[in-house]
Amino acid sequence: MKNFDEYSATADELWEYCMLEYQSTNPFTKKLIANYYDKIKKIISDFDSGFRILEVGCGAGESSRKIFDMLKGQYFEISEYDERYVKKILELNLPYKVSQEDVFNLHRIDNEFDCVILLEVLEHLTDYEAALKELFRVASGYVLISVPNEPLWRILNIFRLKYLKYLGNTPGHINHWSPAKLKKVLNNFGKVVKIETSIPWIICLTKVLKN
């Protein structure tokens, strides 16, 4: 979609734009996405059947649908800040609850969920430490996070002739993460117990340590 403006787009336009990557027919892109979700499934498969799981910042909810299919009876719900996404997700009548809320101010009590998931969001946040503090407040067991693996992400963008005037940086990505940097930051909030790389992403599972 040329000249796409995320902020002025209608709910339908925003939804269509977000789904472009998932609907790609490029076999290389499809393989990368499949590998990414295989790594997430491997982590989630170890979760207890009684876990309560919340995905925050679900966007168009495509990740949510994939995660839900990985579960084995665990309670699952999702939330998103942008009301346009929430509107579209509600129209789908999915078998789990969706709420509108801000990652910096989750409408949840302390320790409400065994695992809180945040995929492809942290790179967009001006105050990522405040967001992490909120995620770890709500989680009683684990926080699962994924981010683009830099500088590999930008290099691959350049190879596919994307965002060249930004030197390959995807517009809106204001934080850039390597596995070492992400691990260091997350260890300030808990204990990183698993870190995976799935080109071009980093996936990190952190155990919540309560006082």
Image (tube, rainbow, N blue to C red):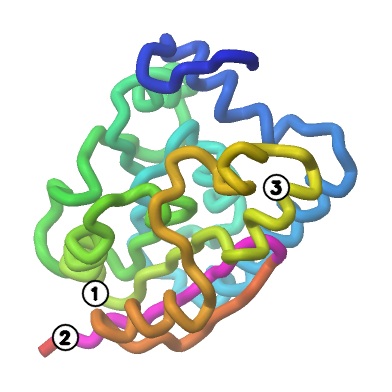
Q: Which residue is mark 3?
A: 157
137 versus 117 height, above or below = below
89 versus 13 height, above or below = below
Q: Main secondary structure of the magenta part?
A: strand
Q: Residue at x 56, y 42 (%)?
A: 166
Q: Position of residue 14 (x, y in %)?
A: 48, 19
The kind of secondary structure element at disc 3 is helix
Nearer-N-terminus badge (3/2): 3
> Residues in magenta?
199-210
Quadrant of image for the C terminus: bottom left
Amino acid at pointer 2:
Lys
Q: Position of residue 16 (x, y in %)?
A: 58, 19
Amino acid at pointer 3:
Asn
Nearer-N-terminus badge (1/2): 1
Q: Is residue 187 left or right of residue 104?
A: right
Q: Is residue 104 left or right of residue 206?
A: left
Q: Residue at x 53, y 17 (%)?
A: 4
Q: Residue at x 23, y 65 (%)?
A: 129
Q: Which residue is mark 1?
A: 140
The answer to the question of whether label 1 and label 2 lie on touching residues, with beta carbons closer than 8 A, is yes
The kind of secondary structure element at disc 1 is strand
Nearer-N-terminus badge (3/1): 1
